[in-house]
Image: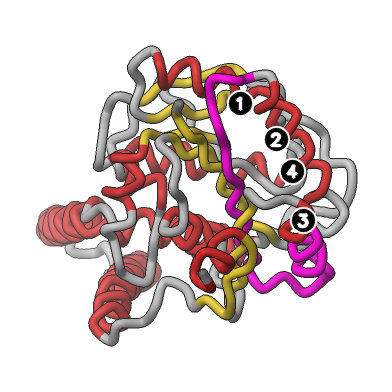
Amino acid sequence: MDKVSFVIPCYRSELTLRQVVEEIRAAMKGLPAYTHEIVLVNDCSPDGTLRVIRELCEKYDNITAISLARNFGQHAALMAGFRHVTGDIVLCLDDDGQTPAADAGKFLAEIEAGRDVVYARYSNKQHSAFRNFGSRVNEIMTRFMLGKPRELYISSYFAARRFVIDEVVRYENCYPYVIGLVLRTTKNIGNVDVRHRQREVGHSGYTMKALLGLWFNGFTAFSIQPLRFATLVGVFCAVSGFLYGIYTIVKRLLNPAVPLGFSSLMSAVVFIGGMIMLMLGLIGEYVGRIYISLNNSPQYVIREVIGQKENKDED
């Protein structure tokens, strides 16, 4: 009998987490061929999420909870959860109830059919315009920077075989990006159609700062395409400057009365200077992340482990 490990990063979910856990338990009752466990990762939530997690751990003996010392972000929380799973299949979903746990059987059926990883595909996401914009940018980035197939839909609701998760957790640097780690592990990835629910309470924890940090993690940790783009821009600027210089000389020889263009000169200087600063900043981002990684900055810091794992350690 296969075991399914549900991993749920938790942040500001004191009003929704109980419902998500109960829905998981109800869904698994309809799948008697599987046993399950639930791993909750409290990403230093400032509300009463940890209190709810403790109550759930006391109520059910198949729930493990991990409390992080500070907020490390969703992907670091997932990595912490991955290192505590014991199941043959790992299924990740959100803590806000928008990703219906009742559809877990769809993911498991695809895994049993031979897929290594299965992502939820939403026909109509019930996020805000800001989050939908962020998802669209993330879609473009993963396609061009990480080689994601155009037809593959990526989301936070997904299932993976244990060997994929074991490979993912081998990554120990401080900027984890789970999508990139999955894409470099296997290409045997599919989609299942899932209805995305409207958020009933609260609001998304993703700010513009968090989304920018996620994007930077994606294309600086797993791709050198931005550096190649910087090289192409440098070549373009150099060739454009050379051609413009020839054009200026020829124009001056043909018509000596034509004044030298101060405005065009300043435009060229400002454009090229701006591009140089942009590319230096990009290179600095890579160098800075290398420096932080060499300093062994942690992906996450666990304050305590609650529930099933804790009881086993005491035994």
Q: Which residue occupies 71% across, 48% down?
A: 95
Q: Nearer the viewer, residue 149 or 179?
A: 179
Display colour scheme: secondary structure
Q: Which residue occupies 26% across, 62% down?
A: 258
Instruction: Tell me whether the residue at label 1 lies in contact with that at label 2, contact meaning CB atoms closer than 8 angstroms.
Output: yes
Instruction: Tell me whether the residue at label 2 lies in contact with that at label 3, contact meaning CB atoms closer than 8 angstroms.
Output: no
Residue 179, how many percent across, how many down? 40, 45
Q: Is residue 141 magenta?
A: no
Circle 1: residue type:
Ala
Location of residue 14 with respect to 46 vertically, above or below: above
Q: Select label 3 or label 1 by which is in front.
A: 3
Instruction: Tell me whether the residue at label 2 lies in contact with that at label 4, contact meaning CB atoms closer than 8 angstroms.
Output: yes
Counting other residues with Cα less than 10 Å from the Cα at mark 3, is it few (<14), some (14-19), or many (20 or more)? many
Residue 234 falls in image quadrant = bottom left
Circle 3: residue type:
Leu
Circle 4: residue type:
Val
Q: Which residue is mark 3?
A: 56
Residue 188, how many percent across, how many down? 29, 24
Residue extending farthest front: 315
Q: Which residues are magenta?
A: 31-56
SS label for mark 1: helix
Give me the disc on residue 24.
2
